[in-house]
């Protein structure tokens, strides 16, 4: 399932797959794990990390893999960093926040300005899957995350949302 994803060089470094005891080294290692998890899921447009079924935990080429306990340490760090949220109480599924809501809000507003949507209306569907959003950080994003980003813009007075006949037809007017 790693498809066309190109793993970074540090993925071939055997100690990467063992949580390091030195605090400074471990902080660097956790940063690399956050980067890997985020890039992998963003590049492949995967919205949920399933702990027991994620290919990044194992590198068969060097015969190394994270232990189940270390996987929990890595994912807990990932969630604490604000890049993920637990989807269940048993902590077996983690929603990947490709970008934090505040970052996504900024990206959406920049897109709205660049594409002439200020004082104009578009739908949530257009933001998620429209032709104008190809290559944008929010293309194909989790709808709940998209709505949270729009709520940030609404709080900033940069847009208002209104109900459509279905959730994908909900409208957004940018200011």
Image (cartoon, helix red, strand yellow):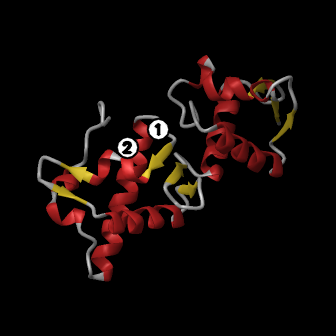
Q: Position of residue 42 (x, y in %)?
A: 45, 40
Nearer the camera: disc 2 or disc 1: 1
Return the residue at label 2. 40
Q: Residue furthest bottom?
A: 22
Q: Quadrant of the C terminus?
A: top right
Residue at screen point 30% across, 37% down: 2
Q: Are marks 2 and 1 in contact (CB under 8 Å)?
A: yes
Q: Residue furthest left?
A: 62
Q: Against 139, is 39 above or below?
A: below
Q: Quadrant of the N terminus?
A: top left
Q: Residue furthest front?
A: 90
Q: Position of residue 157 (x, y in %)?
A: 84, 47
Mark 2: which secondary structure?
Answer: helix
Q: Is residue 132 left or right of residue 175?
A: left
Residue at screen point 24% across, 51% down: 58
Q: Residues within 10 Å of mark 2 (few under 14, many from 20)?
A: many
Q: Nearer the viewer, residue 96 or 53?
A: 53
Return the residue at label 1. 46
Residue at screen point 74% across, 42% down: 150
Q: Is residue 124 left or right of residue 72?
A: right
Q: Tell me the distance, in whole angstroms, between the alpha carbons under discs 2 and 1.
A: 8 Å
Mark 1: which secondary structure?
Answer: loop
* Labels 2 and 1: the sequence-earlier one: 2
Residue at screen point 31% across, 45% down: 55
Quadrant in the rendering for residue 72: bottom left
Q: Residues within 10 Å of mark 1 (few under 14, many from 20)?
A: some
Q: Against 46, is 37 above or below?
A: below
Q: Nearer the viewer, residue 29 or 165?
A: 165
């Amino acid at each position: 399932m790693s498809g066309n994803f190109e793993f970074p060089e540090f993925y071939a470094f055997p100690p990467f797959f063992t949580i390091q005891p030195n605090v400074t080294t471990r902080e660097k290692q956790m940063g690399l794990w956050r980067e890997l998890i985020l890039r992998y899921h963003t590049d492949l447009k995967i919205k949920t990390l399933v702990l027991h079924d994620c290919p990044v935990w194992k590198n068969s080429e060097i015969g190394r893999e994270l232990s189940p306990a270390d996987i929990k340490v890595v994912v807990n760090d990932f969630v604490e960093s604000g890049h993920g949220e637990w989807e269940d109480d048993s902590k077996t599924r983690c929603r990947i926040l490709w970008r934090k809501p505040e970052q996504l809000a900024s990206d959406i507003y920049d897109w709205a300005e660049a594409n002439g949507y200020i004082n104009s209306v578009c739908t949530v569907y257009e933001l998620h899957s429209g032709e104008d959003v190809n290559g944008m950080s929010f293309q194909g994003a989790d709808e709940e995350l998209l709505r949270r980003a729009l709520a940030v813009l609404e709080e900033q007075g940069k847009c208002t949302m209104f109900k459509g006949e279905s959730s994908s037809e909900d409208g957004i007017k940018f200011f």
